[in-house]
Image: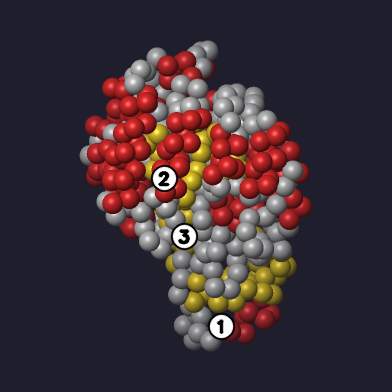
Amino acid sequence: MRCDLLVHGARQLLTIASRVGPRRGTEMAELNIIEDGAVAVQGDHLLLVGPTREVLEHAGEGTQLMDASGKVVMPGFVDPHTHLVFAGDRASEFEMRLKGATYLEIMAAGGGIMNTVRATRAASLEELVVQSRERLDRMLAHGTTTAEAKTGYGLDTENELKTLEAIRLLDESHPVDLVPTFLGAHAIPAEYQGRGEEYVHLVVEEMLPRVQNGGYVPHDSPFFCDVFCEEGAFSLEQSRRILKRAKELRMGLKIHADEFTSLGGAALAAELGATSADHLACTPEAEINLLADSGTVAVLLPGTPFGLGEAHYSSARKMIDSGVPVALATDLNPGTCYCEAMPFVMALACRQMGMTPAETIVAATINAAHAIGLGHEVGSLEVGKKADLLVLDVPDYRHLTYRFGTNMVNTIVKAGRVIEQGGI
Ligand code: NIG
Ligand code: FE
């Protein structure tokens, strides 16, 4: 058995070996740790996973050895909710908020998402790719090896398609694998103010079919449609229309639900069999139970209230205890959460949402992979899965959330390729 790379001697090897589907309830705290563990990699996938004494026997001529003694080895992070592709920034709105303006007030006054839409429309495809690649580099440096990336700052057919093209170019040219999501219904653009129904019509009758027919929906990998179901954005009925159309076009479904107000978006996600429902900061208990029944993954984004300086976080503890599979994501975006680092989000989840360190790791790996339709490929260290792994400069997995504000990722292996920090 030829192997190209062998990582050995890990003090803790977190395999997170998966059950079928995302983990729920008490399984969310099981990391399936091998002490003094090792993995052997062949090409871009994992060939062996086990104790060092067993795996090391398979080292041969030409095998690159990587000593992980004293360190933690785990699967690369999967970030299942990002608005990676945008131009410009909104540092001035951050300051306005610190002085008392709220996010929804700034949005109602023509700022917020529309601010970034103007910058994104003005940017060329190349500029968009260059600006977004810098963020992708930082995501990888902090351990993210697979991520979802949304459109939503184009808000007209041409610029939404330009954003999908940017996602494709980034996916092809960068080690981090990207799963695209069409979020044409992110906001009602300025030119449609007061004509929200007409904009929904455009999304349903023009944008979605163009996305499908333009070859942007891959045959062999996931593609999603998302909607911002919120006061001042899209109503429950409008969200239903858009998502139903997307389902007809065989796209997977996601929804921004209950970020600021509860409109019934979580129940809609359950009704339509959405892959994930995201944010869920003010979801009523009855709707939490609907998510548990449907198996829709709750993608929680504690970086967002933190970024907004708000005190209200999702009830992760209640969701996990009710049997909802929970994942974590950054929500990387210029308005509410300009954060590329999954470990910071996990550190927040422990302190603000009552999750344990082990639960945050499951939420940031295998459950996050299921939230973007890639649970069979990434998110755990199992034979046959993609060789996406991290060597952490910590003696125990709890340090990943116990400590915060510095990068504890020592080495990243992406699809079998070793990426030294700083060597991206
Ligand atoms: O997930 N809520 C909608 N979308 C983003 C914010 C986007 C922005 O403000 O630019 C979010 O928080
Ligand atoms: Fe978002």
Give the number of the mark in front: 1 or 2: 2
In contact (CB < 8 Å): disc 3 and disc 1: no
Residue lying at 66% horizontally and 36% vertically, measured from the top left: 287
Identity, as a three-letter code, of the amino acid under mark 3? Glu
Residue lying at 54% horizontally and 73% vertically, measured from the top left: 384
x and y, in percent, of residue 280 in the image: 60, 34
x and y, in percent, of residue 26 in the image: 76, 52
Marks 1 and 2, how far apart at CA: 48 Å
Marks 3 and 1, how far apart at CA: 22 Å
Identity, as a three-letter code, of the amino acid under mark 2? Ala
Q: Is residue 388 left or right of residue 175?
A: right
x and y, in percent, of residue 381 in the image: 60, 66
Q: Nearer the viewer, residue 361 or 264?
A: 264
Here the colouring is secondary structure
Location of the C terminus by quadrant is bottom left
Give the number of the mark in front: 2 or 3: 2
- Which residue is tagged 3? 420
For the residue labelled by badge 3, is the local secondary structure a helix, a strand or a loop?
strand
- Which residue is tagged 2? 246
x and y, in percent, of residue 417 in the image: 44, 67
- Which residue is tagged 1? 59
Q: Which of the two discs, 2 and 3, labels the residue nearer the N terminus?
A: 2
Q: Is residue 409 left or right of residue 175?
A: right
Q: In this view, does 24 lie to the left or right of 174?
A: right
For the residue labelled by badge 1, is the local secondary structure a helix, a strand or a loop?
loop
Local crowd at mark 1 within 10 Å, few (<14), some, or many (≥20)? some
Q: Nearer the viewer, residue 168 or 388?
A: 168
